[in-house]
Structure formats: C-alpha cells, structure tokens
Amino acid sequence: MDQSSLGGLAGWFASMIMKANTGIIANIGLGIVGAVVLNFILGLLDIYAADAWITQLFVGLVGACLVIWLWRAMRGRS
C-alpha cells in the first residue's frame, strides 16, 4: 500500500472520529501530516514505529486526530 492511500485512509478514519467535514485531498493531507508529526514525536521519545502498513496506518490515524485537535484548538483562540 502506498503512502497516499495510507494517508487517505488514516485521514478519512480521523475525520470520522473527530467529526471533521473534510474532502479527499484534506484527508490525504491529514493522514500524511499526522503520520509525519506523530513519527517525529515518537522519535523524540526514542520509540520506533515499525514500517509495516498497519502500524503506519495507526500512527497516521492518531497523528491526524492530533493535527485536527491542534487545528481546532488554535482556531478557537483566534
């Protein structure tokens, strides 16, 4: 499974969990950015997330939820 389809799937799941009305492009972006962000945070904690697609799907899902939450928190302060 390639990165964009994993990102799309992770972003789609995250948008359903977080009740965000996003389109397919935003879902892909959320999944990919979420995976990058959470992999970075895990790296700072010396935790290695395996390169297996299911692990990265989970990391992308959690990361995308984190990105949505952070976006809402920042937007709410404006």
Image: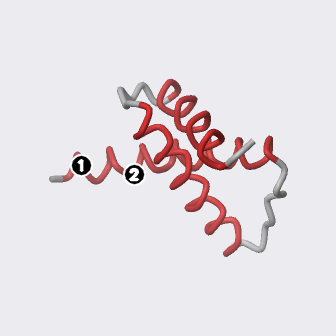
Q: Position of residue 30 (x, y in %)?
A: 48, 46
| In front of the other: 67 or 7 | 7
Q: Residues within 10 Å of mark 1 (few under 14, many from 20)?
A: few
| In front of the other: 46 or 64 | 64
Left or right: 53 in relation to 10: right
Asked which secondary structure carries label 2, the reply is: helix
**What residue is disc 2 on?**
70
**What residue is disc 1 on?**
75
Identity of the amino acid at label 2? Leu
Left or right: 12 in relation to 62: left
Asked which secondary structure carries label 1, the reply is: helix
Residue lying at 32% horizontally and 44% vertically, measured from the top left: 72
Residues at circles 2 and 1 in contact by the CB criterion of under 8 Å: no
| In front of the other: 62 or 29 | 29
Left or right: 78 in relation to 23: left
Q: Quadrant of residue 31?
A: top right
